[in-house]
Each structure stands twice: as structure tokens, then as C-alpha cells.
Image: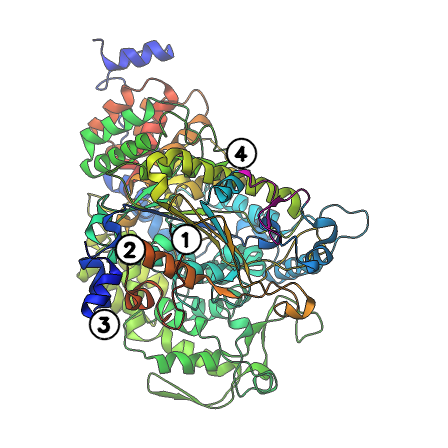
Amino acid sequence: MPEPHFRLKNALGLEPRSRFFGVRRVSVDFESALALSRFGLGSTAAGLQALPRPARDLILDEIDRGRVADPGHGSLPTSEALIAEGSGFFQARLKPGETKLQSPVGPAVDAEVTARYHDTLMTPPVGFSERLVMFWMNHFAVSLDKGTAVHISAGAYEREAIRPYVYGRFTDMLLAVETHPTMLYYLDNVTSTGPNSRTGQRMGRDINENLAREIMELHTLGVDSGYSQADVTAFAKALTGWTANKRPGGDGPVGGFTFRKTLHEPGGKTILGEEYHEDGFFQAADILVSLSNHPATAKHLSTKLARHFVADNPPKTLVDRLSSTWLDTGGDLQAVYATLIDSEEAWAPTPVKLRTPQEHLIAMLRATDAQLTPALIKRALTAMGQPWWKPPGPNGFSDLSAAWLTPEGLSARMEVAALVAAKTSRDTDPREFAPAILGPRLSDGTLAAIERADTLRQGISLAFMAPEFVRR
Amino acid sequence: MLNRRSFLTVTGTAAFGAFIPRVASAAGARDPRFITIILRGALDGLAAVPPVGDPGYERLRQAFAITSPLKLDGMFALHPSLTNLARQYRASHATVIHASATPYRARSHFDGQDVLESGYSIPGHTKTGWLNRLLKVLPATQRAGGTGLAVGTVPPLVMRGSAEVMGWAPSSLSLRDDNLPPRILAMYQDTDPALARAFDTALATDRLAGETTGEASGQYSGKYPMTGMATGAARLLARDDGPRVAALAFNGWDTHTRESKKLAELLTDLDGALAAFETELGPKWKDTVILVATEFGRTAAINGTQGTDHGQATAAFLVGGGVKGGRVITDWPGLGQAKLYEGRDLMPTTDLRAVIKGSLTELYDLSPSVLASDIFPDSAAVKPATGWIA
């Protein structure tokens, strides 16, 4: 039987290369290779060698700079404009002679996908900030399935309520999220009405607890952290009146946030034993500030960050360290991320996390010159089990690698890998490509498998499915 | 063997109800396949099963009334795209449950699907589904296949939960390189045992589902995705060592605009899926019960964009050789303006939970208390209706 590389050579008409002489072993430090996948978006097509400095330094620079890219660079519409457009469309009716109305929802979503997948996710050398954006978007999850208002404005919500606050204080992000119309629609607060408010009295309407419950359970304190049903109900009452303008002629532009006093349940509220006097909009805002500074919130979020970047069951020492930074700095996220990057536990050389399907697709696209249309990007994400901004519930997509390591999930990743490989330019040689993007993480076993490939494209697919590429 | 009735006679009390499944299961004689198909987006029940005998129907639908419907009885007909279902109906293998609905009375897909799939009476319970909780109380014989089957990379909520579930997803991107899967497996075997195990299972499942021959996916994936999913799922369910309980979700039923054309395509595919189950399940078909349900119905009248908007009651179906079929079961509310829910939607008269609970009672002899607490929480007031299973 001939040497494997001869088979490749014969199939491709290329010169054989010895694993020991021909293949370029990239001289990049192991830690940078690890950092690109664990804390970043994966190597760009230029390869790890194109990194100007060690990846760890680049990440700390990103944190210091404290700025996050703006998808579309200001060209994409605001949530107000989008929600107004969506509601206008669904009130419109066909005029005589028209056969079809073009919904603005699909194009709006596709523009958001394009702005990210063709730009903000592709260009940064490491992409720690974009990983954080995805982390927080999943923490404060909304779903396109909820209805037109959420569907059309989810991207604007991410641009307006998540991105500007990624390097700020958690309190500020929390306030931005919970006052954002997209979240108020998603968790049903737009119609929540205090039973003793003017509207409640007149129309016999009542509160909807959804937002209050999810803020406590998912966004801040965490489940089983000591709050009661009475706390949820009182908080829901405090949140009544936080809504969005649905019609023109209200107290602000259609689609924008408004505090509507006629929906607000009057009176003081007691939450976690603390009294909040009646103060209109500021009552619930004060409660949010308290929740954001609660030790249970610090622990909940520290655990989630460590779980996302390091391990399904993160080391307690790491969680404690993040948590104490959080409490010492009043939830200064820049300080929390810096603590994470400076922690020994975050740099274990053997990866135990799987890239999520979304991270996997991004890494494949960054590593090649392949470009997918928004439709194909959404199809690929759906096939792999992480449909674009459609998590199964308000708790977001699972951040446990165990949940992603499924037979059907891996099988779908293979199909996406083959799809991206098929769109990669024909002169990409996987024997150079794999070392360039994986650096010293590339194992001999994987390299041997790639060298045995029948075709160049198959070799690239194998690199995409390699344990070093799938795990981070 | 003691059946439920004689057990009750012997003990003279229903107090031991909770223990019945272990003692004397009707499933002793039967090894059923129970499949739930969720139609996501809200099926227009008045178009799928038009009440052609109701004088209100033509008035509401006018030019959009279904032409050449397949008559079921003096009152109801099937949409002409449902030719296989009509055949199954005539063979007494399909029952329509009309004017049925979940307890959800608002109009959000998301929340409506939560209620339908979680089995709770209110939205917000997105962690476990009633079918997964059913798996946990089934007698051991019914867990011979080890697991339930969830079709799709993301299991439908109805099948999510702590009971073990096997997943299978039809190929949706049509892989053209047959040599790639074995190459990846070989790479994992050399480098990563955990990935190798999972990938090996994926290849084995695909093989059983007919995936590697391209039959389940290639043939259908483009034009008839539902038929493709059903074909693969049925092949897995047909095996003696395969799963007994399955969940599939079919998307796209939200027909706000140009409903006639869209619905004809969707119903053709659904009809193909029901035929595929019959063909592929072979000898198991006689013990098969397929529940087809959607989150809610649509407005009784046509809207301004030649479609229908979110409504309330709709049609559900029980299909399979195990079904006492050939019937339309309904407490028909009528389509007169005053009879419509909020003046716009078909009025719900049958709680879908009564149908599902009744079917499960007959299939598995589950106790009312288990059904009213574990499977459909807080549903004690909704008594299981029986008479669904042949």
C-alpha cells in the first residue's frame, strides 16, 4: 500500500509532502492557539502566524479598549423604526390590484445576519468581544418565534441593549435590557396591567408575571436563590406600566419604550424584605438596581461566565474569584473579564468544552474564504440545532457541552463542514490549512487523517471536524 | 391475564388506580407505537377539514371555500390534498377531532406551542414535555427500545425532559461525499473516544433510518421534508429493538397570506408523511396511533391578504391501525356569527387533553391520577374521554 500522501497526491495531482519535512509546522505558542478557540472566534484564514502579538495580550487589549463593534456601522434601523414598520405591515391590507405584500421581517433579519457573518464576526483577529456579545445575547435571550415585534427587532435589541454595555457595569446592561421594547414584548410585559391601575379597574385586567419571574430566575439572582412567589408577584406589579408605544399619538414614537401610568399598580412593594415606595417608573428601576447588586446575582453570573468559557462544572476557586471581583467592583464587567483571563484555571491545556454550533460555523467561515448567504447561514445553524436567535426558551441555548455532544448534532456539523468546505477556494491545501489555523494544537492523528483524505475538500471537512477544531 | 375492568371488579374500588399499569396492562397484548406530530404555526382546521354542511362555512370563506373536498359525512370533508388520509379514514384508521383546542386562549404561537407541548395549562413551562414525562411512567415492556425518539437536531419541547431520548435528524443539506463519514469516524477512533462514540451512534442511526442510502432524505428533503422525516422515523420505530414513542414537529402552518396555495403544499406533504408511516411501519401499523395536533386554529373568515390570522379551535387527528377510525368526533359549535369565539374564531368545544389522556389510558392503562399530575399537570377537571383505540 502506498504512503497516504501519495494517495492524496494521485487524487489531486499535487506533490507529495512528508509530514516531517514538507508540512509547515507553525511556530505559534500553544497558548495563543488555545486562546483563539477558547476565548475567541477561531483563527482567520491568514492563520495563527498572522497574529501580531500573543493572543492573551490581544484579549487583554480588547478588554482595556472596552469597545464593541457596531454591526452595520450605523446603517441598520433602530428597534423603534423596525417595530413600527412591522406593526404597520400587519395592519396593512392588499389594495385592489396588489397580489402580495412583501413582509419587512425577513429582510430585516437577513440584514442583521449579514452585518455579523460577513463583517463583525469575520474581521477581529481574536474576537473576544464578539464572544461576549453572544454570551450576553444568550443570557438575555429573546426568540424570533415570539411574534412580529420581537422577530423584526431582535437584532436591534442586541445592538442597542447588549453591545454598548458589554464592557460596562452589569447594572447598566440590566436596565438597558429590561427597558427595551423587544424584551418587554418577548416576556409579555407590554400588556401586564396592575389590577388597581386605572386600566385594570376599568377593564378588569391583571398582571403578567413572566418578565418579573425570568428577571429573578434567569437574568439576576438565579433559580433557588431564596426569592419567593410573593417576591415575583410584587415585582411584577412594580413592573406594570413598562411597555412599548403601540400606536401613533401616544407619549412617544411607535415601538419605543414608555412608562404608562394608567397600567401601573399603585402603592409600595416589598421585595426580598425590602420596601420600595411608590415612584412610578423608578420603583421597578430601583428594584432592578438592587437585584443587580445582590450577591446571588454575582455568583449566578460568575458561574455562567466560567461555565461558558472554561468547563461545564467550572472550578469553584475560579467562580469564587470572579464573584469577589464582581462584588468588589460593583459588577464592573471589564474587571470581571480581566480576572477570568488572568486566572490559571481558565487556561487548562486540555479543552473540555465543545464549540457551540454557532461558534463552530463562525470558526469555519473565518478560517476560509467561503461566504454563505444569510439563508444558508440560517439553514446551517438550524440544522446543527442552534437556529438563529431562536432558543428553546427564555433560558437561552444550553451552555453545557454535554448537551451539544449528541450523535445527531455531530452528524449535522459534518454536513455543514462539507458545505463550507465545498465553498472554499480550490487551491486551499488542507495539509497547510490545518497547521495554519490550529497551530501546535494539531495532533499527529488528525494530521494523518487529513493526509489520508480522498480530496482536498474532504481534507478541509476533516480539519473542520477534527477534535482540535470542535473542542475549545 | 387480569384486565382493568376485572381488576376493578375484583378489588371493588378504584383506589389502587395508580398501581394498575404494573399489574395488568392492556399493553400486554399489544406493543403500540405512539407518535405525536406537532404542526407548528397553527393549522387552519376549517380548510383542512371543511364543515361543508354548515351554512356558515360558505358565508365565511366565500371564494376561498375548498373546491372538490373529499366528503367524510354529511357535514365534514377533507381538503383535496389529503388523499391518503381520506383512504385511511375509509379504512377506519383515522379519526378527526374537530373544534378542539388546548386550554390556551390567547394568540401567540410561542406560548400556544408551550401549552400544547409542555402539557401545562399555562405558558412558560419550557423545560419538559408531556411525551417525555409519559416515557417515565410507561411499563418496562414499553421501554424495550430503551428510549423515545425525537426527530430533529433540536428535540421538540413535547419530547424534552429527563427521560432518555434518541435523536435523529434527516439530512437537510444533502451531503454528497459518501466517504466523509467513515473518514471522520476513523479520525475520531484515533484521536477522541467520546466523539467517536457519538459519531458512531449517529452513523448507525442514519443507517437504520435509511439515511445512508439517501432514501429518507435525498428523495424528499427538498420538496417534501415532512415525508422525509416520517420515512426515517418510521424505519426506526418499525424495529423490534427500536423506540416505541416518537415526536416530530412540522413547521410552516402560519398561513397569513395566500393560504390556498401554501396550505395545499403543506397538506400534500403531511399526507405523504402519514402514508409513509403506514408503509414503513409494515406489520407494526396495526398497533400504531399517530396524534396530529397544532397550537391553535385560525380566524373563521379570510383576512385582507388571502390568508387567515391566529384563532382558537381547529382540527386534530388520530391516525393509525390502532385507531378506532372512520369518524369525525366533535361537539360542533357552528359558524354563525354569535357562535364564534370573540366573534371571529371557531369556538373550542373539546379539550385536546381529554382526547390525549383518553388515548393514553386506553393504550397504556395509565391511572387518572398519573395523567392528571405527571402527564398533564393540574388537569384533574379534564376527564379522559375514551373510545379512541380499536
Asked whether, in this view, residue A452 is left or right of residue A43, the answer is: left
Measured as percent of width and height from the top left, residue B254 is found at 57, 52
Image disc number at residue B364: 2
* Marks 2 and 3 share the same chain: yes
Label 2 to label 3, Cα distance in Å? Answer: 20 Å
User: Mark 1, chain letter?
Assistant: A
Measured as percent of width and height from the top left, residue A106 is found at 59, 48
Label 1 to label 2, Cα distance in Å? Answer: 45 Å
For the residue marked with disc 4, what is the amino acid?
Lys
Front label number (4 vs 2): 2
Q: Which quadrant of the structure image shows residue A153?
A: bottom right
Q: Which quadrant of the structure image shows residue B230?
A: top left
Extreme residue toward the right, this view: A96
* Marks 1 and 2 share the same chain: no
**Residue toward you, A465 or A118:** A465
Image disc number at residue B223: 4
Q: Which residue is mark 3?
A: B13
For the residue marked with disc 3, what is the amino acid?
Thr
For the residue marked with disc 2, what is the amino acid?
Tyr
Front label number (1 vs 2): 2
Q: Secondary structure at mark 3?
A: loop
Q: Note whether B185 is above or below A254 in the view shown.
A: above
The part of the chain drawn in magenta is B67-83
Front label number (2 vs 3): 3
Q: Which residue is mark 1?
A: A134
